[in-house]
Image (cartoon, grey):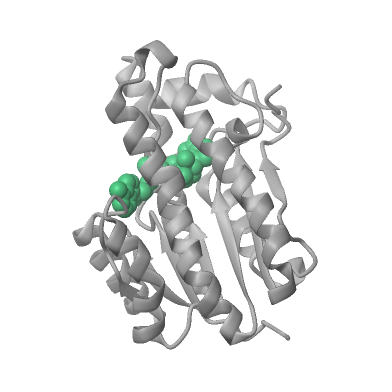
Amino acid sequence: MNRNNSKIVLVTGACGGIGKSIVIKYAQQGKTLAIADKDEEQSLKLAHEIQQNGGQAVSFSGDLLDKRYCDNLANEVQKKLGSIDILINNAGLMRRGDITQTTDEDYELSMKINVEAPFRLIRAAIPLMADAGGGSIVNVSSCWGINPGPNHLIYCTTKAALAAMTKCLGRDHAHQNIRINAVCPNEVNTPMLRTGFEIRGLNPDDAIEELNQSIPIGHIAEPEEIADVVTFLSSDEARYICGSLVEINGGKAVY
Ligand SMILES: NC(=O)c1ccc[n+]([C@@H]2O[C@H](COP(=O)([O-])OP(=O)(O)OC[C@H]3O[C@@H](n4cnc5c(N)ncnc54)[C@H](O)[C@@H]3O)[C@@H](O)[C@H]2O)c1
């Protein structure tokens, strides 16, 4: 089935650095956006911004820690917008530290947002997509989900779980014409990265300037450079890509 007419896209973490770029890119392609973020004010503002620019967007804000919200979200989107053709599991949380510095709260929050929420959202979306003849899902993992970076034990663990989940799903649901892939970025210029520098008492602009020197292509990723790959993976141009983990790293691999 040709999915070129796929129209309705659900994006979680839609108001964050990478999420907002993904939303804007899909809006530019004429897709209808279901905007999911825990920040209700920002979700409504982003939906309004898209509408002002001639696009279609509806806020479905809520907290991914709420199991019922996760279980019902895909159905709510289908009920209100007619279908769910593309799901982007972008929301994520980064807790830092080695295992001795990782609290029960760090563990539970990270597992719930980075692993359980995508699990619940995908489990609910698959039957809807299958009934419609297909669909596409892109998970936002991390290059640290493939090879771990230092002193981010729970973050790397959860992103590795999401990467493994993606590979299982890619194989299990290809026969239903549902393609599931993940992007695995290295450093991206977003609040998640910048607050990490602030916590360490560094000026984020200076720290990023220094970090840029370590990237073979010359700079860390801007959110738009991730959004371009996400939208490609959900498009018909990527119709034979299933269960892939696409590293986006400007030549700076993690070993
Ligand atoms: N920034 C990076 O360097 C980088 C690198 C690799 C992967 N990633 C991944 O990219 C994704 C997006 O990251 P970002 O840098 O844009 O982060 P961000 O902090 O800018 O945005 C995260 C968004 O998720 C939302 N969110 C957080 N907890 C939520 C909850 N409980 N319920 C609903 N929404 C919630 C936030 O409100 C925010 O809008 C994450 O999964 C992250 O792990 C980021």
x, y percent for residue 211: 55, 22
x, y percent for residue 142: 57, 38
- Residue 82 falls in which quadrant of the image? bottom left
Does residue 179 appear in the picture of this structure? Answer: yes
Is 241 situated above or below 27? above
Is 53 placed left or right of 232 in the picture? Answer: left
Residue at figure coordinates x 45%, y 20% from the top left:
207
View quadrant of ligand 1: top left
Location of the N terminus (image quadrant):
bottom right
x, y percent for residue 147: 65, 27
Is 148 placed left or right of 158 in the picture? Answer: right
Residue at figure coordinates x 35%, y 14% from the top left:
101
- Viewer-nearest residue: 222 or 75: 75
- Viewer-nearest residue: 90 or 17: 90
Residue at figure coordinates x 30%, y 57% from the top left:
67
- Viewer-nearest residue: 155 or 237: 155
Residue situated furthest right in the rendering: 240
x, y percent for residue 130: 60, 79
Residue at figure coordinates x 48%, y 22% from the top left:
153
Residue situated furthest left in the rendering: 41
Location of the C terminus (image quadrant):
top right
